[in-house]
Image (cartoon, rainbow, N blue to C red):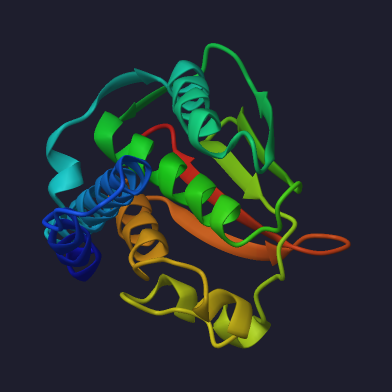
């Protein structure tokens, strides 16, 4: 993003730049700043999660509303390229860190959007049991080989598939999810989705 911003700003210095091209370059520069902010936020959050800072702030969170609000924000960004289906149990309370929960949901959904073909469906479900809250995010992407199902949670890891390598990403999103879920005394698993794609399953204890 920094290199892109530098190139755009240097182009804007030209005196003979047409007005139409001027506007396009400004838009590209703004998009680069958004990418840089997202990257820096991810790096900072990864550093914080390494120190288990998520354990310091626990409140009674209305998880159902939090998921719906997060989904609404992401639909504004990805709604023209993907369909998002929600099946969320209402009125579920969870004693946890709100920032951590929001980051978990947001990163899982962004991961599903990024690695799924345009026009595909991303599903998010949430339900409560006697002991856990279970959040599942499913996509219709290429899927994850069994050999990589644990590796995808490592910092900066990105799959070896050509499609994934060409997709923009930091390799931090799933690592952050894993650290935050662990910090909430939960666990995350991956299973194959039939006929294609992946499902990420987060289980967070309700009695922690």
Quarter location, residue 89: top right
Give the number of callouts: 0
- Among all residues in the image, which is located at the extreme top? 91
Q: Residue at x 25, y 65 (%)?
A: 4
Q: Position of residue 164 (x, y in %)?
A: 56, 75
Q: Position of residue 38 (x, y in %)?
A: 27, 51
Q: Residue at x 59, y 53 (%)?
A: 112
- Among all residues in the image, which is located at the extreme right? 195
| Quarter of the figure with the C terminus | top left
Residue in the foreground of this view, choosing between 67 and 21: 21
Q: Is residue 62 visible?
A: yes
For this view, does 140 lie left or right of residue 125? Answer: right
Q: Position of residue 28 (x, y in %)?
A: 33, 51
Q: Is residue 144 above or below residue 135?
A: below
Q: Position of residue 69 (x, y in %)?
A: 45, 20
Quarter location, residue 135: top right
Q: Is residue 50 visible?
A: no
| Quarter of the figure with the N terminus | bottom left
Residue in the foreground of this view, choosing between 5 and 93: 5
Q: Residue at x 38, y 55 (%)?
A: 177
For this view, does 168 lie left or right of residue 122? Answer: left
Quarter location, residue 70: top left
For this view, does 192 lie left or right of residue 174? Answer: right
Q: Residue at x 69, y 53 (%)?
A: 139
């Amino acid at each position: 993003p920094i290199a892109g911003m530098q190139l755009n700003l240097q182009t804007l210095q030209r005196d003979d730049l047409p007005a139409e091209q001027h506007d396009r370059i400004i838009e590209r520069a703004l998009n680069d700043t958004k990418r840089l902010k997202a990257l820096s936020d991810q790096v900072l959050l990864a550093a914080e999660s390494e120190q288990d800072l998520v354990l310091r702030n626990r409140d009674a969170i209305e998880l159902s509303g939090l998921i719906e609000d997060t989904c609404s924000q992401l639909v504004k960004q990805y709604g023209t390229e993907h369909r998002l289906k929600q099946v969320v149990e209402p009125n579920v309370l969870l004693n946890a860190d709100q920032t951590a929960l929001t980051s978990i949901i947001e990163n899982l959904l962004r991961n599903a959007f990024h690695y799924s073909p345009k026009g595909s469906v991303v599903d998010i479900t949430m339900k409560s049991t006697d002991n856990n809250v279970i959040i599942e995010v499913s996509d219709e992407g290429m899927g994850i080989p069994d050999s990589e199902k644990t590796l995808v949670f490592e910092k900066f890891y990105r799959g070896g598939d050509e499609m994934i390598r060409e997709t923009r990403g930091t390799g931090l999103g799933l690592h952050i999810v894993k650290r935050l879920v662990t910090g909430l005394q939960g666990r995350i698993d991956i299973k194959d989705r039939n006929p294609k794609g992946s499902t990420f399953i987060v289980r967070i204890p309700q009695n922690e």
